[in-house]
Image (cartoon, rainbow, N blue to C red):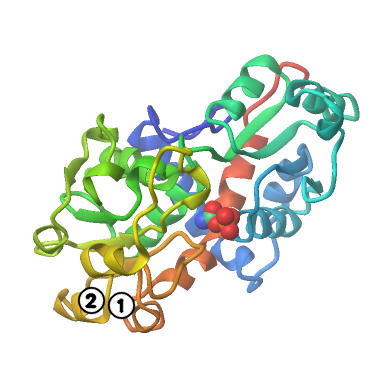
């Protein structure tokens, strides 16, 4: 099975074979992504079909830079907007903004947006434009999920039967949701851990929920920490105290020492050192935080090529 879809708005509902085809492709593209080899002619020709705008309406370092570099290493026509004022600020709708881009023959939009569902709405409204969700509110961040699956599969060969503990502000985490769906599709179990008030009522992907980090870490095959997403708290929600949070839910050096030596520690970033993860854990031997960033270009190249091979109605 291959990934043949117009858009990627989430990992929810993707088949195991679709995920595996993207991860296999990212593996094959690794030499090109890391600039060890030039791109082959067939991939370069496929990539030329795309004209991409990276439309980032929230801050980003990792996702934006790795999409831009993935596009550059594929030789794709591309433009990044969002940091500077756009006509959205003058009242133009997101739909009309993307129609403007479509009118100048852009056929692929990588969209980061503060509202859940914005990428899906654009994808639905515009049948001739590929849309990739680069993170929408608290809904999903599917390409980060793919990056994390890629790093774990590279390490283990297969995710079947593995137990991945994700600890942090689960309620507001689009990364936790995408990982839970992706891990389930690949035969692994997500254990979502955090303060009771920051756990969802309805666990994504059949994940386990717990507020007992010490118990969750027993038998963990991998651990991912998440930051507290201050910007997504409602006015009537109270933020956890950082030091109290670290004591109960932080990946401290002491907790990391109690893990098996082969257990990788992940974080999608950005990291608040000394809150959800101690600095020495982030820089320590179990950390794969920078391996996640390194994998992001290959994974996003694989997705872009898969989209390039998925015809649009106007093709
Ligand atoms: N993981 C992630 O989405 O990081 P950025 O916000 O820096 O893109």
Q: Which mark is residue 286?
A: 1
Crowding near the residue tagged with mark 2, few <14, some 14–19, many ≥20 C-alpha atoms within 10 Å: many
Are the residues tagged 2 and 1 within 8 Å (C-beta)?
A: yes
Q: Secondary structure at mark 2?
A: helix
* Residue labelled 1 has its Cβ within 8 Å of some atom of ligand 1: no
Residue drawn at x 32%, y 55% as measured from the top left: 168
Frontmost residue, 180 versus 36: 180
Q: Closest to the observer: 96 or 18?
A: 96
Q: Is residue 114 left or right of residue 91?
A: left
Ligand 1 shown in quarter: bottom right
Direction from residue 104 to residue 81 in the image, left or right: left
Q: Earlier in the sequence, mark 2 or mark 1?
A: 2
Residue pictured at 21% horizontal, 64% vertical: 248
Asked if 190 appears above or below 272 in the picture, the reply is above
Say which residue appears at 86% left-offset and 26% top-offset: 100
Q: Is residue 188 visible to the viewer in this orientation of the structure?
A: no
Q: Quadrant of residue 15?
A: top left
Would residue 210 be visible to someone looking at this image?
yes
Mark 1 Cα within 10 Å, few/some/many (few <14, many 20+)? Answer: many
Q: Position of residue 4 (x, y in %)?
A: 53, 29
Where does the image place residue 14, in percent across and percent down from the top left? Answer: 40, 31
Which label is found at residue 256? 2
Direction from residue 291 to residue 155 in the image, left or right: left
Q: Position of residue 98 (x, y in %)?
A: 78, 27
Quarter location, residue 266 = bottom left
Distance of mark 2 from mark 1, alpha carbons?
8 Å
Residue 282 versus residue 160: which sits nearer the camera?
A: 282
**Residue 280: x percent and y percent?**
36, 84
- Camera-side mark, 2 or 1: 2
Q: Is residue 276 left or right of residue 22?
A: left
């Amino acid at each position: 099975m291959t990934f043949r879809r117009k858009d990627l708005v989430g990992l929810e509902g993707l088949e195991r074979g679709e995920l595996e085809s993207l991860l296999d492709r990212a593996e094959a593209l690794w030499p090109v992504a890391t600039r060890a080899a030039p791109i082959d002619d067939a991939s370069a020709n496929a990539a030329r079909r795309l004209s991409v705008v990276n439309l980032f309406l929230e801050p980003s370092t990792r996702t934006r830079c790795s999409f831009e570099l993935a596009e550059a290493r594929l030789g794709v026509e591309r433009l990044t907007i969002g940091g500077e004022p756009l006509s959205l600020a003058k009242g133009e709708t997101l739909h009309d903004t993307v129609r403007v881009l479509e009118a100048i023959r852009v056929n692929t939009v990588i969209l980061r947006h503060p509202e859940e569902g914005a990428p899906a709405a654009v994808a639905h409204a515009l049948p001739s434009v590929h849309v990739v969700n680069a993170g929408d509110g608290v809904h999903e961040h599917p390409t980060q999920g793919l990056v994390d699956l890629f790093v774990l599969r590279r390490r283990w060969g297969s995710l079947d039967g593995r137990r991945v503990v994700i600890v942090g502000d689960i309620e507001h985490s689009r990364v936790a949701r995408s990982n839970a769906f992706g891990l389930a599709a690949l035969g692994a179990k997500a254990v979502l851990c955090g303060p009771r008030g920051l756990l969802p009522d309805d666990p994504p992907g059949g994940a386990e929920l717990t507020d007992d980090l010490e118990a969750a870490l027993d038998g963990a095959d991998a651990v991912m920490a998440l930051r507290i997403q201050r910007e997504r708290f409602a006015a009537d929600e109270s933020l956890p105290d950082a030091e109290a949070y670290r004591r109960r839910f932080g990946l401290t050096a002491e907790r990391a020492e109690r893990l098996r030596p082969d257990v990788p520690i992940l974080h999608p970033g950005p990291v608040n050192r000394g809150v959800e993860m101690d600095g020495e854990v982030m820089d320590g031997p179990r950390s794969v935080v920078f391996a996640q960033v390194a994998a992001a270009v290959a994974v996003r190249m694989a997705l872009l090529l898969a989209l390039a091979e998925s015809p649009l109605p106007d093709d």
